[in-house]
């Protein structure tokens, strides 16, 4: 099976712009979670989606949003980008029979200038 | 709220030596506990997870971890380090509401010396 794929892998944006990141989970996985990884804050949970519904949300401002489509693909959006949003954004999917396990994609490296 | 503490942001061992990476957690019982590894420019890979079935958990690549409730610890070990083990290791705990809402430790960078 193909792993979790994330597009794009690298992205450079300007402060104030918005950005959309995409994640395609492993085939058959219906749960998708997003994490932000920065040198200063480490790995932080953003949100989790299951069957197109947001199940959990981390402690991030409303500028961070996400959605999941009927094919389980997910997108996250960050509006009004700030320099501090520069990070590696990781997506993970989980199988139904081992729902506590998460399989991570390679991430999207976002740089805000 | 859950928290995870990883003692030692950098650990160096010689090839063939014991690897010990420490993790202490704060969570409700039973906790969802995991170890992940991250190689440069890659995502995270699940090494192992705690299940209530056993306190000693075996994972991939020869790693194992022991759950000690009395010490709230879940230390990761490997009897003999290999050069390919050099990477960053993260301990994580799932929330009581969802095993998939993980709180990660700050990570331990493992260096393996020849």
Image (cartoon, rainbow, N blue to C red):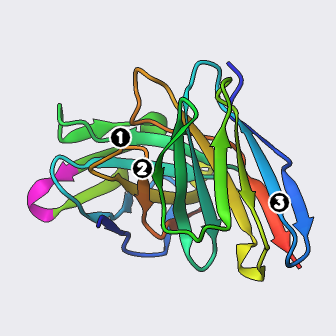
The chain carrying label 1 is: B
The magenta segment? B67-71
Could you tell me how far apart the alpha carbons at marks 3 and 1 are, in whole angstroms? 34 Å
The chain carrying label 2 is: B
Determine if marks 2 and 1 fall on one subunit: yes
Q: Is residue B104 visible?
A: yes
B70 on left or right of B31: left
Given residues A63 and B3, the one toward you in this image is A63
Given residues A67 and B114, the one toward you in this image is A67
Assign a secondary structure to mark 1. Answer: strand
Q: Which residue is mark 2?
A: B35
Q: Give the residue drawn at x 55%, y 69%.
A: A60
Q: Are marks 3 and 1 in contact (CB under 8 Å)?
A: no
Q: Is A109 a magenta residue?
A: no
Quarter of the image where one finds residue B4: bottom left
Determine if marks 3 and 1 fall on one subunit: no
Residue B48: image x %, image y %?
Answer: 40, 40
Assign a secondary structure to mark 3. Answer: strand
Quarter of the image where one finds residue A11: bottom right
Assign a secondary structure to mark 2. Answer: strand
Q: Give the residue drawn at x 71%, y 80%.
A: A84
Which is in the foreground here, disc 3 or disc 1?
3
Q: Which residue is mark 1?
A: B49
Quarter of the image where one finds residue B18: bottom left
Could you tell me how far apart the alpha carbons at marks 2 and 3 are, in whole angstroms? 31 Å
Q: Which residue is mark 3?
A: A19
Could you tell me how far apart the alpha carbons at marks 2 and 1 are, in whole angstroms? 6 Å
């Amino acid at each position: 099976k193909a792993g979790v794929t994330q597009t794009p892998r690298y992205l450079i944006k300007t402060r104030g712009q918005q950005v959309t990141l995409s994640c395609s989970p492993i085939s058959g996985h219906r749960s998708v979670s997003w994490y932000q990884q920065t040198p200063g804050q480490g790995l932080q949970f953003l949100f989790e989606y299951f069957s197109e519904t947001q199940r959990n949300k981390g402690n991030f401002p409303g500028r961070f949003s996400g959605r999941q489509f009927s094919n389980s693909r997910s997108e996250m959006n960050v509006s009004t980008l700030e320099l501090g949003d520069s990070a590696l954004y990781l997506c993970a999917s989980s199988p139904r029979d081992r729902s506590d396990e998460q399989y991570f994609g390679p991430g999207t490296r976002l740089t805000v200038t | 709220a859950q928290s995870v503490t990883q003692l030692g942001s950098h650990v160096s061992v010689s090839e063939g030596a014991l690897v010990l990476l420490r993790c202490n957690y704060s969570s409700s019982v039973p906790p969802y506990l995991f170890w992940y590894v991250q190689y440069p420019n890659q995502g995270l890979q699940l090494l192992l997870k705690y299940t209530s079935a056993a306190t000693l958990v075996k994972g991939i690549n020869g790693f194992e971890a022991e759950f000690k409730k009395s010490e709230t610890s879940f230390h990761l070990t490997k009897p003999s380090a290999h050069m390919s083990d050099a990477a960053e290791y993260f301990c994580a705990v799932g929330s009581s509401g969802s095993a998939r809402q993980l709180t990660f430790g700050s990570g331990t960078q493992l260096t393996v010396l020849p």
